[in-house]
């Protein structure tokens, strides 16, 4: 029986319930065997994060602790080069059977930026793409992506066929929460309780993270 593995990459600076609730709903609603949260080491598309990669990793670990369907994969932190998703997909693919489905999960904002990604036009050769709605991101897809969606999208994730090559949109519980918002709250001495899991909340305060602007 073919497996269904999801991958949600991100800076997770810090991980928050927008990531986690989306990940859990995708994993449960679309019968994933496992959904991997993959923290970036050196995000190619943005400046250096304020907190160390190990601290971001630790927060994701704390967030998924005890949740069987979600796990952390630190392969991008073990690589000594930029976190290109194509490399991560290839290395995950190498661990799977050829019929297994690999789902690259992207929020709408990340999906809209896809044409700037390294070897973006090869991604669908290795995975399907699942796009999460992002109520806090009002961005239009560039024409190249609209063409790709017209050619490759299916009605919903249950309609994905085969190990790779299609795009589907997910209507998970909309949570207009971003890591940027959380960093800004902390930098202005406001409380982020309930925006992040309690274990992450405690870690942030125990280590004094993000609390100076
Ligand atoms: P920042 O505000 O620092 O840019 P972020 O909150 O967008 O961070 P990332 O770690 O950059 O978080 O996001 C990782 C992935 O999770 C991306 O694909 C992003 O679109 C998605 N994502 C982030 N927040 C949400 C949310 N609230 N709902 C759905 N998807 C989300």
Image: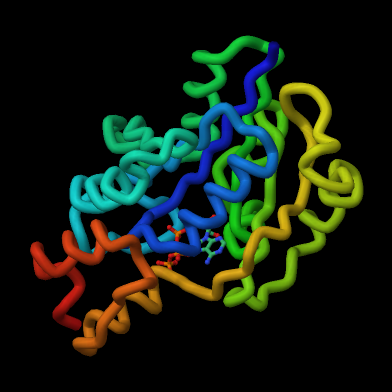
Position of residue 104 measured from the top left corner of the image (x, y, whole percent): 61, 40
Q: 5 or 63: which is nearer to us? A: 63
Place residue 211 in its image quadrant: bottom left
Q: Is residue 94 above or below residue 199?
A: above
Task: Reply above or below: 118 against 160.
Answer: below
Q: How is the image coloured?
A: rainbow
Please state if 143 lies on the left or on the right of 180 as rendered: right
The part of the image, by quadrant, that contains residue 50 is bottom left
* As drawn, 91 above or below 35: above
Task: Say whether residue 191 is visible.
Answer: yes
Q: Position of residue 54 (x, y in %)?
A: 19, 46
Q: Residue at x 56, y 20 (%)?
A: 93
Q: How many marks?
A: 0
Rendering coords of residue 14 (x, y %):
32, 61
Q: Residue at x 90, y 51 (%)?
A: 150
Horizontal side, residue 13 vs residue 7: left or right: left
| Image x and y of residue 98, in percent | 67, 11
Task: Report whether residue 122 is seen.
Answer: no
Name the foreground residue: 37 vs 24: 24
Q: Residue at x 66, y 78 (%)?
A: 138
Left or right relative to 117: residue 172: right
Quadrant including the N terminus: top right
Is 153 located above or below residue 134 in the figure? above
**Front residue of this view, candidates 148 and 159:** 159
| Residue 19 appears left or right of 93 | left
Name the residue located 37 percent from the left edge and 33 percent from the top edge: 73
- Quarter of the image where the C terminus is located: bottom left
Camera-side residue: 143 or 65?
A: 65
């Amino acid at each position: 029986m073919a497996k269904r593995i999801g991958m949600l990459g991100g800076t997770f600076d810090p991980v928050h319930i927008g990531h986690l609730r989306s990940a859990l709903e995708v994993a449960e609603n679309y019968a994933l065997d496992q959904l991997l949260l993959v923290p970036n080491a050196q995000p190619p598309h943005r400046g250096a994060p304020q907190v160390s990669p190990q601290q971001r990793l630790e927060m994701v670990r704390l967030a998924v602790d005890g949740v069987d369907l979600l796990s952390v994969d630190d392969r991008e932190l073990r690589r000594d080069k930029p976190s290109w998703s194509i490399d991560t997909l290839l290395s995950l693919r190498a661990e799977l059977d050829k019929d297994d489905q690999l789902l690259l999960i992207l929020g709408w904002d990340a999906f809209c930026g896809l044409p700037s990604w390294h070897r973006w036009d090869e991604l669908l050769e290795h995975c399907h793409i699942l796009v999460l709605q992002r109520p806090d991101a009002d961005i239009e897809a560039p024409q190249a992506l609209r063409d790709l969606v017209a050619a490759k999208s299916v009605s919903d994730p249950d309609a994905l066929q085969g190990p790779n090559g299609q795009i589907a949109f997910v209507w998970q519980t909309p949570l207009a929460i971003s890591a940027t918002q959380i960093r800004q709250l902390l930098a202005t001495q406001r409380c982020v309780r309930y925006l992040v899991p309690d274990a992450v909340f405690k870690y942030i305060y125990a280590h004094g993270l993000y609390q100076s602007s």
